[in-house]
Image: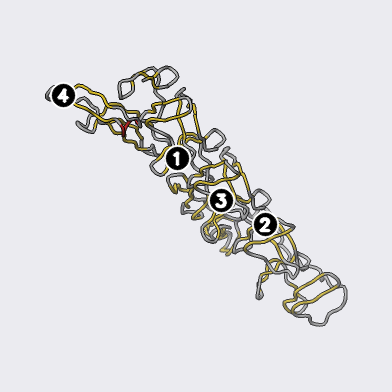
Amino acid sequence: MKRMICLLCCLGLIQIWSVPVWGEGECSHLNRMSQSKPATCTSAGYMREICENCGEVLSEDVFPATGHQLGDWYVITEPTCETPGEKAANCICGQVLAQIPPTGHSYGAWVTISTEGNREVQESICKNCGDVRERTVEKDESKPSEPEEKPDFSPDPDPEPVSDPKGWTHRGDKTYYYLSGRKYATGWLELENWYYFNEEGIMQTGWQQIDGQTYYLGEDGMMQTGWLQDEGRWYWLSESGAMRKGWQQIGNGNWYYFDGAGVMQTGWFQDAQGKWYWLSDTGAMKTGWHQTAPGRWYYFGSSGEMQTGWLYQGDSWYYLGSDGVMQTGWVKSDRGYWYYMEPSGRMKTGWLWTANGWYCLSLLDGHMLTSCYAPDGHWINEQGLWQP
């Protein structure tokens, strides 16, 4: 018994011929469909060819889980002496969290707070959290007691006699702030804004290294925060005024990268792990599809990392070269299979017409068939061309 089948839909050709119908209870698997699930960081993916009639899986390729592709870590919660903190890194699958161990106490020197006979009660204060620990020790009467430390009186920076200065005082190109009498401010001072004075009481301006952090103080001495442009370069100063480095999420959620000198980066950027990112003219990190030059499309994951190799996006497969550029036309994979990528970059499946003739591309994974029979029963030669 025979029936007539039109292969217009599956072959792209108007060809009609007769094929045998299998016996009762058997399936010829003529109607096939493909199923695919991309591998994720934590779960495997697959590409399958399934018979639409009986549901049998005719072929299957399994792709292992890719594992997380993490960007630079950034701190969410700072650890304390006794409490762990939390850090995060962005992956193509989302945010990955990890714990930061507690820093542990950093106690200062022991200081005597009371004496009873030959016993001394001493305390030591943690420089980080202020926690106090105490101990009682026996005094060593054999050693002479050390003289108490004398206070260090700073010299008056003003050579001219001043009766009772208060507030701002200018001497030449130097500016001071007197608190009362002849006592001038040193270190940080908060008035309407924050100012910094050195040990001699002179107000500081410009870039300053203070306690391991970098700050920028305007010409009027006021500490700057937020975006700062200096000599054509952009910097980001936190609410505390400290200059930030590395990855920073600012404002509307955009990510920016600042180098070791605090300068905002633009264009291509490669991190210490060798991963590439694209930072716009404004410094904002790009995600998704982006064209950096005519005809050069790239895809950047949710972490901003440039993708390479096979990419499953929007129900279609794309192939990105080792340089990240989206490929079009014929592409040869590492396994030696040929694929055809449309001008949009999407992988082609089914029949393909070119100037050379007809090619048959697997409905399962898109690779070009060679040296086998096409679904219409005609031979596909070793060059992949259909021979009627």
Amino acid on which the number 2 mark rests in the picture: Trp
Q: CA distance from mark 3 to mark 1?
A: 20 Å
**Farthest right residue in view:** 160
Residue 323 visible here: yes
Q: Secondary structure at mark 2?
A: strand
Asked whether 8 or 167 is in front, the reply is 8
Q: CA distance from mark 3 to mark 4?
A: 57 Å
Q: Which mark is residue 57?
A: none
Q: Is residue 134 left or right of residue 199?
A: left
Q: Mark 2 and 1 residues: CB-CB less than 8 Å, in contact?
A: no
Residue 80 visible here: no
Residue at 48% of width from left, 38% of height from top? 345
Residue 357 sits in which quadrant?
top left
The numbered mark, 3 or 4, whose residue comes first in the sequence reads 4
Asked whether 275 or 298 is in front, the reply is 298
Q: CA distance from mark 3 to mark 2?
A: 15 Å
Amino acid on which the number 1 mark rests in the picture: His
Asked whether 4 or 55 is in front, the reply is 4
Which mark lies nearer to you, 3 or 1? 3
Q: Which residue is mark 1?
A: 68
How far from the left and from the top, in percent, is residue 240? 61, 63
- Relative to 116, residue 348 above or below: above
How far from the left and from the top, in percent, is residue 323? 57, 35
Q: CA distance from mark 2 to mark 4?
A: 72 Å
Q: Which residue is mark 2?
A: 234
Q: Which residue is mark 4?
A: 26
The numbered mark, 2 or 1, whose residue comes first in the sequence reads 1
Q: Residues within 10 Å of mark 3 (few under 14, many from 20)?
A: many
Q: Mark 3 and 4 residues: CB-CB less than 8 Å, in contact?
A: no
Q: Residues within 10 Å of mark 4 (few under 14, many from 20)?
A: few
Colour scheme: secondary structure
Q: Which residue is mark 3?
A: 285
